[in-house]
Amino acid sequence: MWLAIIHAMTWPTFMYGTAWKKDATSQLVQLAVRSGFTAIDTANQLIHYQESLVGEALLALAKNGVKRESLFLQTKFTSTGGQDHRTPYDASADVTTQVRQSFESSLVHLHTDYLDSYVLHGPTTRRGLADEDWETWAAIEEHHRAGKTRFIGVSNVSAEQLALLCSKAKIKPMVVQNRCYAVRAWDRDVREICRREKMVYQGFSLLTANGEIFADPKFRAIAERAGVGLAPVVFRFAQQIGMLPLTGTTDEQHMKEDLACGQFTLSADELKTIETIAL
Ligand SMILES: NC(=O)c1ccc[n+]([C@@H]2O[C@H](COP(=O)([O-])OP(=O)(O)OC[C@H]3O[C@@H](n4cnc5c(N)ncnc54)[C@H](OP(=O)(O)O)[C@@H]3O)[C@@H](O)[C@H]2O)c1
């Protein structure tokens, strides 16, 4: 039955993020898909995301002929420490049960019977991995093994945590989603592990975490040379160095501008300049 989920679509090149959209989530997801996004990121965590409103958008899009298989859906398991009282699972249950319940409720919210990618929102500890994290990862692995999600991954990890997970996990993460700071060479240490282990690196807050670079004359000169705005340069840079960028824009023109970043190319020198711009 789950064989049906093995379809041709692999990783997208850009992802639309749905955090902090609140009641506008459904309208914005529909707008994003109409604008050309095919990949949506959410989480089963009501503090920051409205996963069920993403699902509402998917129903509306389906009525207009957008098939589930044409979209890449990614959501996350958030442990109790990242939830408020609206935990989407029994918080007193064991972690394996929590993951199962959260996963099942994500499927209900998103009106689907499989996910493209399922991500552990973050380890419960800043250093190393706690027993709870290992149990959570094992439960996530199980969902991949059962064919219910094509890819599995982890978010908000340090290089040390990622290396540890890769060294001991039965199934290594296939994707990492991290906040990406220019002052850390755009998360170079974590990206390097991803490159070595053939994992997809997803960068978020590429604009909001790096405001300082927009005033840099070297950066502005690159945008001018390319004849585009500042945001597309960041996203194109991300794609060309092997990242899958996320954007959280709420503006139709920005959606189109962000997506159009695939239409120009930065030179090797320009990539090097941007990679080291805040070091
Ligand atoms: N795993 C995690 O813990 C985690 C944490 C945070 C975020 N995320 C994911 O990452 C996604 C993106 O995060 P983010 O919202 O911080 O990303 P972001 O794209 O860096 O920031 C969005 C901001 O950039 C602006 N923007 C986007 N395109 C623009 C353009 N072309 N020109 C000018 N401004 C532009 C937006 O303004 P306008 O709305 O006016 O366009 C908005 O203020 C989230 O929605 C979520 O899915 C994950």
Image: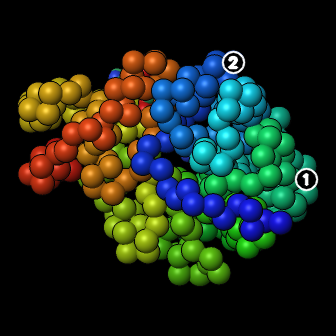
Q: Position of residue 187 (x, y in %)?
A: 35, 55
Q: Distance between the Cα atoms at labels 1 and 2? A: 29 Å
Residue beneath the point at 87% across and 60% down:
97
Residue beneath the point at 76% across and 40% down:
110
- Give the labeled residue for mark 1: 92
- Give the labeled residue for mark 2: 23
Q: Quadrant of residue 226?
A: top left
| Rendered image coloring scheme | rainbow
Q: Position of residue 211 (x, y in %)?
A: 29, 30
**What kind of element bears circle 2?**
helix
Above or below 146: residue 186: above
Category of crowding for the residue at label 2, using alpha-carbon neighbours closer than 10 angstroms: few (below 14), some (14–19), many (at least 20): few
**Could you tell whether 265 is left or right of 197 in the image?**
left
Which of marks 2 and 1 precedes in the sequence? Answer: 2
The kind of residue tagged 2 is Asp
Residue beneath the point at 12% across and 49% down:
267
Q: In which quarter of the image is residue 255?
A: top left
Q: Quadrant of the N terminus?
A: bottom right
Above or below 206: residue 137: below
**Could you tell whether 54 is left or right of 30 in the image?**
right
Category of crowding for the residue at label 1, using alpha-carbon neighbours closer than 10 angstroms: few (below 14), some (14–19), many (at least 20): few
Residue beneath the point at 45% across and 61% down:
200
* Number of marks: 2
Q: Where is residue 268 in the image (x, y as percent from the top left)?
A: 12, 54
**What kind of element bears circle 1?**
loop
